[in-house]
Image (spheres, rainbow, N blue to C red):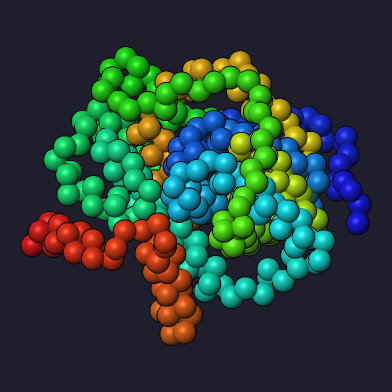
Amino acid sequence: MKIFHGFNISNLRGDFFGGLTAAVVALPLALAFGVASGLGPLPGLYGAIIVGFFAALFGGTSTQISGPTGPMTVVIASIFLHFDRNLEIVFFIISLSGLMQVLVGCTNLGTYVKTIPDSVVTGFMSGIGIIIICLQIPVLLGLGSEGNVISSLLKLQYISDYKIDSLIIGLTGLLIMVFVSKKIDSYIPRPVIALIVGSLLASFYFTNQTLIGYIPSGIPSFSIYIPTLVELPEIIFYAAMLASLGVIDSLLTSIVADNMTNTNHMPNKESIGQGIGNFFSGLLGGLAGAGATMRTVINIQSGGKTPFSGLLHSVVLIMILMFFGSYAGMIPLAILASILLKVGYDIIDWNFVYSIKSKSKIDIFIALAVILMIVFINKTLEPIEQLEPIITFFSTIVL
């Protein structure tokens, strides 16, 4: 197996524009995923830079752009809460999951991802989309953020306490994400438009906002956490879960890239590249990442054909962090919520929903069972009895 894959200098111009455009799109998403994970915006940026760089350098998909994704962020948020918001343990788990991904690639297990039933993938991805939507609705209303679905839905009991400024900013961002034409989006991506417009409105007109806050500039510091024997079993379990998701998430994106470029990715090498990226991301305080479908598609559409585009994407983000990081602190959380709401909607497998009449009963059952398991069965969730006031609240609205 070659160390590097897909590098050549025949498409430098296309790779330049592909990487640059992907970086512009990655910036608001990295910040949003960092905030949504509970770790903060800076780990989100670190994750986009570090995972993006090493996955491009050592991965097996030439056009793939990697970084924090919705599914990975939801799992990290769950781990963060489970370990009582202990950042050191979370970063250790991210690094350990990276080593497990490398092991998957070295043992040729990456080729078996295609054997996972479509109904399981549908249920898993749709469940993640639902979680993202539920977690971000209170943020868009200015009610604050919660770490799990039930607590977020309970927040809606206090919907009369919403902040009008946050709602206006959030709805503006949502309208931009949904209705800006594809032609405009091809020049200035929707998340970037939403980020700029939302930040300007929050700075000059609707100032009663919760902002990201101060983001320190500079490079991350190196740290290693040594777990105790008592902690180790749970740490290994969560690392394995994160590694499995990272492999699946990345290789599904690789298939999308193959279809767009008429190429064939190397699944085991891609797992190794993603694993190296997550290993160093955890060591340097970054969020876990995987192959990012939207950023990969944008890279390809903008001319990217080789891993140089992925490397440039990371270099551009480093420059932004070092010289413009302080300005990112002025971004309102409501605008990030609007971007994530659209991300959550897009993750849901609507093709399965629209064709549900043609699906077998067993496929429907499996998909629904996985969705319910992903959304509600979680060690970080409150007792299930808390669903009662949620049901009462929505019943009041309906009746």
Q: Is residue 19 visible?
A: yes
Residue farthest front in this picture = 229
Left or right of 325? Residue 65 is: right
Q: Is residue 25 visible?
A: no
197 up-or-down from 111: above or below: above
333 up-or-down from 148: above or below: above
- Residue at 62% of width from left, 57% of height from top? 229
Judge by depth and name the residue closer to the eye, 16 or 249: 249
- Residue at 76% of width from left, 56% of height from top? 102
> What is the quadrant of the C terminus in the image?
bottom left
Q: Quadrant of residue 244?
A: bottom right
- Residue at 28% of width from left, 31% of height from top? 166
Residue 47 is situated, as x and y percent measured from the top left of the image, at 62, 38
> What is the quadrant of the N terminus in the image?
bottom right
- Residue at 10% of width from left, 59% of height from top? 396
Judge by depth and name the residue closer to the eye, 270 or 382: 382
Residue 40 is situated, as x and y percent measured from the top left of the image, at 48, 34
